[in-house]
Image: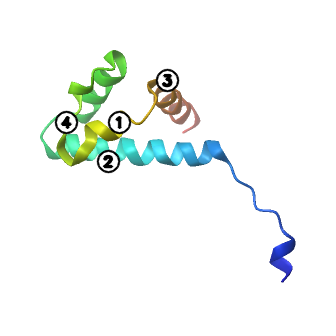
Amino acid sequence: MEDLDLTRRFNIHYEKDLEIKAILTSVYDSLKEKGYDPINQIVGYILSEDPTYITNHNNARALIRRLDRDELLQELVKQYLTN
């Protein structure tokens, strides 16, 4: 009963960060499976926002298009600078 008195915190930013990481990891793996250089392909997509840089394999192209490019770039920079 004691647990009912506690307030659980919800952090929308943390949830979004997890979604970005999961999608980016899946896209990376799909590109690698198809023999592409995943880093170059993802950078090409981020710079141009042209989805043809991302393979359709494992629905990777549709997945990455679910992310806002600015949010994706912001998360990448944040991870780079904090790790």
Disc 2 is placed on an element classified as: helix
Q: Which residue is mark 2?
A: 26
Q: Which residue is mark 4?
A: 55
Alpha carbon distance from label 4 to label 2:
11 Å
Residue toward you, 37 or 83: 37
Alpha carbon distance from label 1 to label 4:
10 Å
Disc 4 is placed on an element classified as: loop
Alpha carbon distance from label 1 to label 3:
12 Å
Please, what is the three-letter code of the amino acid marked with disc 4?
Answer: Thr
Residue closest to the far bottom = 1
Disc 1 is placed on an element classified as: helix
Q: Position of residue 73 (x, y in %)?
A: 47, 26
Q: Residue at x 46, y 41 (%)?
A: 20
Residue 16, image quadrant = top right
Q: Residues within 10 Å of mark 4 (few under 14, many from 20)?
A: some
Q: Which residue is mark 1?
A: 64
| Residue 57 relative to residue 67: left or right | left
Query: Which of disc 2 and disc 4 is earlier in sequence?
Result: 2
What colour-coding does the image apply? rainbow
Alpha carbon distance from label 2 to label 3:
19 Å
Query: Which of disc 3 and disc 2 is earlier in sequence?
Result: 2
Q: Residues within 10 Å of mark 1 (few under 14, many from 20)?
A: many
Query: Which of the image's four quarters has the N terminus?
Result: bottom right
Residue 50, image quadrant = top left
Please, what is the three-letter code of the amino acid marked with disc 2?
Answer: Ser
Query: Which of disc 2 and disc 1 is earlier in sequence?
Result: 2
Please, what is the three-letter code of the amino acid marked with disc 3?
Answer: Asp
| Residue 32 relative to residue 6: left or right | left
